[in-house]
Image (cartoon, rainbow, N blue to C red):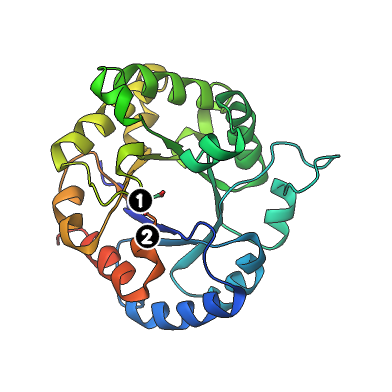
């Protein structure tokens, strides 16, 4: 099964609008000739509209970092799927471990967010992953099973191939510790098997990314694994040169 790799840069709470624009002008020429890889940038809400405008017609798609599951309502500080669609963003990161850890994101809310994003026409990038303690206790598979099954519980069968999953072990996020290619492959193959448990035919079409301290060096060895379909990149995505190098590493061999 040929799955088009996706490399998405999650800027988290970095870059003002002016900084975001400057970055995009540096990134676009560096990825304009890269074929066979989808490229995403996930800036702050405020930079979504400016970056959608300045990347139009390019190979860079713009994703939000979160959204609320309701279409509208009394949810101070939140942003809904129709609001993201209005500014023409391509997709949305859901369930990032920082949202889960600092802002009370739950699997239950994600079970509503994933179908809400799909229904609105947004591509969800659903993040899952275990903590260091869970890995050491041998609980990685139990944690992944819970997160994947809960979050996809209400996703419509025919839209499963539109969901992107990012396996991001929490011990690797922002720590400089990268999962080994074998560790990442093993966990990602397990995630794919979980999807196959309910959607045997679609599971081969679902893209599953690795995230956690991805850098240009090492990206090639990760993407060479059979089940790793790209990257969700945090820190290294803040520099257009480093991010473009990771994008280039994900180009499929001819
Ligand atoms: P990192 O972040 O690349 O800085 O580890 C990854 C992420 O949180 O998506």
Q: Is mark 2 within 8 Å of ligand 1?
A: yes
Residue 218: which numbered mark, if any? none
Q: Residues within 10 Å of mark 2 (few under 14, many from 20)?
A: many
Residue 76 lies in what quarter of the image? top right
Tell which circle, 1 or 2, labels the residue nearer the N-terminal end. 1
Kindly identify the residue that appears in the image at 53 percent across and 70 percent down: 15
Where is residue 253 drawn, in percent x and y? 15, 59
Q: Is residue 250 above or below residue 120?
A: below
Q: Is residue 183 above or below residue 196?
A: below
Where is residue 28 drawn, in percent x and y? 41, 79
- Residue 240 can be seen in this image: yes
Of 195 and 184, nearer the camera is: 184
Kindly identify the residue that appears in the image at 25 percent across and 69 percent down: 245
Where is residue 82 drawn, in percent x and y? 74, 50
Where is residue 66 drawn, in percent x and y? 60, 47
- Residue 169 can be seen in this image: no
The CA span between labels 1 and 2 is 7 Å
Of 29 and 141, nearer the camera is: 141
Tell whether 100 sits left or right of 73. Answer: left
Residue under pointer 2: 235
Kindly identify the residue that appears in the image at 31 percent across and 77 percent down: 33
Q: Secondary structure at mark 2?
A: helix
Residue 216 lies in what quarter of the image? bottom left
Q: Residues within 10 Å of mark 1 (few under 14, many from 20)?
A: some
Of 23 and 62, nearer the camera is: 23
Q: Please say if the residues under marks 1 and 2 sit with CB atoms less than 8 Å apart.
A: yes
Q: Secondary structure at mark 1?
A: loop
Residue under pointer 1: 174
Residue 103 lies in what quarter of the image? top right
**What quarter of the picture does the N terminus occupy?**
top left
Kindly identify the residue that appears in the image at 41 percent across and 22 percent down: 199
Q: Is mark 1 within 8 Å of ligand 1?
A: yes
């Amino acid at each position: 099964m040929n799955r088009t790799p996706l490399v998405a840069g999650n800027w988290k709470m970095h870059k003002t609008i002016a900084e975001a624009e400057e970055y995009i002008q540096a990134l676009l020429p560096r990825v304009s000739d890269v074929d066979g890889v989808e490229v995403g940038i996930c800036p702050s809400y405020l930079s979504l509209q400016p970056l959608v405008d300045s990347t139009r017609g390019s190979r860079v798609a713009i994703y939000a970092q979160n959204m609320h599951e309701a279409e509208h309502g009394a949810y101070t500080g939140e942003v809904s799927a129709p609001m993201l669609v209005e500014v023409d963003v391509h997709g949305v990161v859901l369930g990032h471990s920082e949202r889960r850890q600092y802002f009370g994101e739950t699997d239950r809310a994600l079970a509503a967010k994933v179908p809400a994003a799909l229904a609105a026409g947004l591509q969800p990038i659903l993040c899952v992953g275990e903590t260091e303690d869970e890995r050491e206790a041998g609980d990685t598979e139990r944690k992944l099973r819970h997160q994947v099954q809960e979050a996809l519980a209400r996703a419509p069968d025919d839209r499963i191939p539109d969901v992107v999953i990012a396996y991001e072990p929490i011990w690797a996020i922002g720590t400089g510790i990268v999962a080994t290619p074998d560790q990442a492959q093993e966990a990602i193959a397990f995630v794919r098997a979980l999807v196959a448990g309910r959607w045997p035919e679609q599971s081969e079409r679902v893209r599953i990314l690795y995230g956690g301290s991805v850098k240009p060096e090492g990206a090639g060895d990760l993407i060479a694994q059979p089940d790793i379909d790209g990257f969700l990149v945090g820190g290294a995505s803040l520099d257009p040169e480093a991010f473009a190098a990771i994008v280039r590493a994900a180009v499929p061999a001819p």
